[in-house]
Image (cartoon, helix red, strand yellow):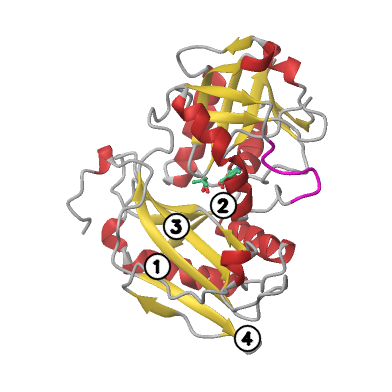
Amino acid sequence: MAKDINWGELPFGYYKTDYNVRCYYRDGKWGELEISSSEYIPVHMAATTLHYGQEAFEGLKAYRGKDGKVRLFRWEENAKRLRNSAHGILMKEVPDELFYNAIVKAVKLNAEYIPPYGTGATLYIRPLLIGSGPQVGVKPANEYLFMVFVTPVGPYFKTGFKPVDVELVRDVDRAAPLGTGHIKVGGNYAAGLRATERAHQRGFASVLFLDAREKKYIDEAGPANFFGIKNNTYITPKSTSILPSITNMSLEQIAKDLGLTVERRKVPVEELETFEETGACGTAAIITPIRKIVDNDMGKEYFYGDEAGEVSTKLYHNLRGIQEGTIEDKHNWTTVIEGI
Ligand code: PLP
Ligand code: COI
């Protein structure tokens, strides 16, 4: 039975649930999964996560389908990306089996918080990996904590599937070309916070970052990848400093399935002028259509429309349909969690 929560009004934020799961890497091996009802973790004051940024996280969702089943979407890709993130900043990798067992346990223990089908809300799953062991010299920790909490969420951008305004940023880099932009580590988000908050204060829903080296090409849209549509083609940036979005990867396939051409390549800023539709995509953002992109420094504005475009709408419904079990999952992307 789902809790009595006003699901339709949920923001994308933290909502307390009953349990989380934790697992420690100590003495060269991963231990047993532990269940906790505390929202706090004891952390050593010299833990590397606090000083040297040994931290990575993931984000995926559990979807209650029209048929009542609960599905995960491409969790193996999140497990793989967390391994890549761990590898990138010298943390111990979480084995896929541990990753899966932890997310399923966290979802099952909090099954009452899975939003019902049709409410627009979903259960967001947040796996987190931190260096928990102490170091004072700049070195990787000897101990790690992997944990998973879940929280019911509404749409990331308040408008839901309604076009939002985006501010193009030229004075801040989120990630360096050979830095950590391609993995999901906390430092990337810290680097972008100032620009993001400034954009919010100016009334924009999100920022659009450019490539750090030349400032010529589109990188990504805050916590989401960017795509543009023109001439029946789905175009998305190729860059070493953007997070490889699982949603974007899936949309590329869905676009192909729908008969669109797909191009992953450098996208010059000037090309913004030529797109019929643009959007941001990600687990949290799903597909968020873009109404306009404002490039203040260049005195330019690119306008795409007050309503979502036809192609974005089709992509959105196909993606959500697969996630919620109303459209055939022909690429085998979903995993049903039995017994809830
Ligand atoms: N880009 C950034 C910086 C993100 O934080 C996210 C969210 O995870 C994405 C893109 C979208 O990735 P995904 O579709 O795997 O959620
Ligand atoms: C996601 O889309 O899952 C994200 O992690 C985005 C953001 C909340 C960091």
Residues in magenta? 173-179
Q: Is residue 18 left or right of residue 29?
A: left
Q: Main secondary structure of the magenta part?
A: loop
> Number of marks in the image?
4
Query: Residue sitting at 63 percent across and 17 percent down?
Result: 295
Q: Position of residue 60 (x, y in %)?
A: 50, 53
Q: Which mark is residue 125?
A: 3
Q: CA distance from mark 1 to mark 2?
A: 20 Å
| Dot placed on the residue nearer the N-terminal end, 3 or 4 | 4
The residue where tag 2 is placed is: 333
**Could you tell me which secondary element the residue under label 3 belongs to?**
strand
Asked which secondary structure carries label 2, the reply is: loop
Tell us which disc is closer to us: 2 or 3: 3
Sequence-wise, which precedes: disc 3 or disc 1?
Answer: 1
Image coords of residue 324 (percent x, y):
42, 45
Q: Amino acid at mark 4?
A: Lys
Q: Which of the 4 image quarters holds residue 140?
A: bottom right
Classify residue 51 as left or right of residue 160. Answer: right
Mark 2–mark 4 distance (CA, rounded to whole Å): 30 Å
Viewer-proximal residue among 3 and 212: 212
**Residue 65 appears in the figure:** no
Magenta-colored stretch includes residue 28: no
Residue that carries the numbered disc 4 in the rendered image: 29
The amino acid marked with disc number 2 is Trp
- Are discs 3 and 1 less than 8 Å apart at CB? yes
